[in-house]
Image (cartoon, rainbow, N blue to C red):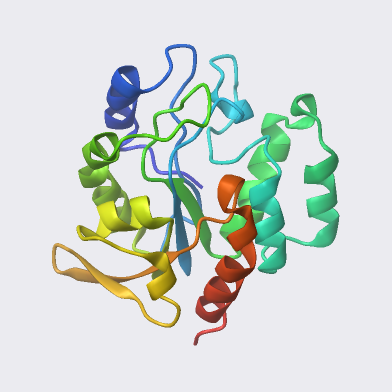
């Protein structure tokens, strides 16, 4: 469910840009040619796997609720599992539960990651320069995973990954091409669906459903 070859490099950047009491959060899910690779911004201390005492996988969104509602709307997790997530306290997010959740996503050919792996104590936005320091590693991660489609959330992440100014509102029915070595990947800039972007979740769902339903 996770690749580890880049973790030391991620951790070196975390020591510079992350909070000293927390750990890097790595991508997780299907690591062999997933149908969709979801790329979010950066993790925060709300993630239960970011604390140093955690003994399970360190993966995006563990211990949080909103993003799993998005995955439910996309048909990626069942209602029963969403109910368990929404009712779980931080203590109930055990390493076993977390691993089973990502196994479920992996079985559905989904991989979830952040552009920056440095965990912040709060949700303050990162500067472009910090994200850019992760860009070469992000491209390495993509090259290892080899996703069929990539969904980038928000203008900032989409612009940095694609190397040009992107407005997600202008990408309703089209995609951008990202070249890494000799390979080309379809990238779909999409509205950020949680936090201040929660109102845009229906737009994100509609966009991603077109990808999920594509042959």
**198 or 3, which lies in front?**
198
Q: How far from the left and from the top, in percent, is residue 184?
A: 23, 71
**68 or 27, which lies in front?**
68
| Above/below status of 190 relative to 31 | below
Q: Is residue 34 visible?
A: no
Q: How far from the left and from the top, in percent, is residue 144?
A: 31, 54
Q: Is residue 137 left or right of residue 45?
A: left
Q: How far from the left and from the top, in percent, is residue 139?
A: 25, 52
Query: Which residue sits furthest bottom?
Result: 215
Q: For the point 85% across and 56% down, which residue is it?
A: 80
Q: Is residue 58 left or right of residue 158?
A: right
**169 or 180, which lies in front?**
169
Q: For the point 49% across and 56% down, which residue is it?
A: 111
**For residue 37, which quarter of the picture?**
bottom left
Q: Is residue 82 left or right of residue 131?
A: right
| Above/below status of 46 relative to 116 | above
Q: For the point 59% across and 14% down, which residue is it?
A: 53
**For residue 169, which quarter of the picture?**
bottom left
Q: Is residue 111 left or right of residue 104?
A: left
Q: How far from the left and from the top, in percent, is residue 164?
A: 21, 60
């Amino acid at each position: 469910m996770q690749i580890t070859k880049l973790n030391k490099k991620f951790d070196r950047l975390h020591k510079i840009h992350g909070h000293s009491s927390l750990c890097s959060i790595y991508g997780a899910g299907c690591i062999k040619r997933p149908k969709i690779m979801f790329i979010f911004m950066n993790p925060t201390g709300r993630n239960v796997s970011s604390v140093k005492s955690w003994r399970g996988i360190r993966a995006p969104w563990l211990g949080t609720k909103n993003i799993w509602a998005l995955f439910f709307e996309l048909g990626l997790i069942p209602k029963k599992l969403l109910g368990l997530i929404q009712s779980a306290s931080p203590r109930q997010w055990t390493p076993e539960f977390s691993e089973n959740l990502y196994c479920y996503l992996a079985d559905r050919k989904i991989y979830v990651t952040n552009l920056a792996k440095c965990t912040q104590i709060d949700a303050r936005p990162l500067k472009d320069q910090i994200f850019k320091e992760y860009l070469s590693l992000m491209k390495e991660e993509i090259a290892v995973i080899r996703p069929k489609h990539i969904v980038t959330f928000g203008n900032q992440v989409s612009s940095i990954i694609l190397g040009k100014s992107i407005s997600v509102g202008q990408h309703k029915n089209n995609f951008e091409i990202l070249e890494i070595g000799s390979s080309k990947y379809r990238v779909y800039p999409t509205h950020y669906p949680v936090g201040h972007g929660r109102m845009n979740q229906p737009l994100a769902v509609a966009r991603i459903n077109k990808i999920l339903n594509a042959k």
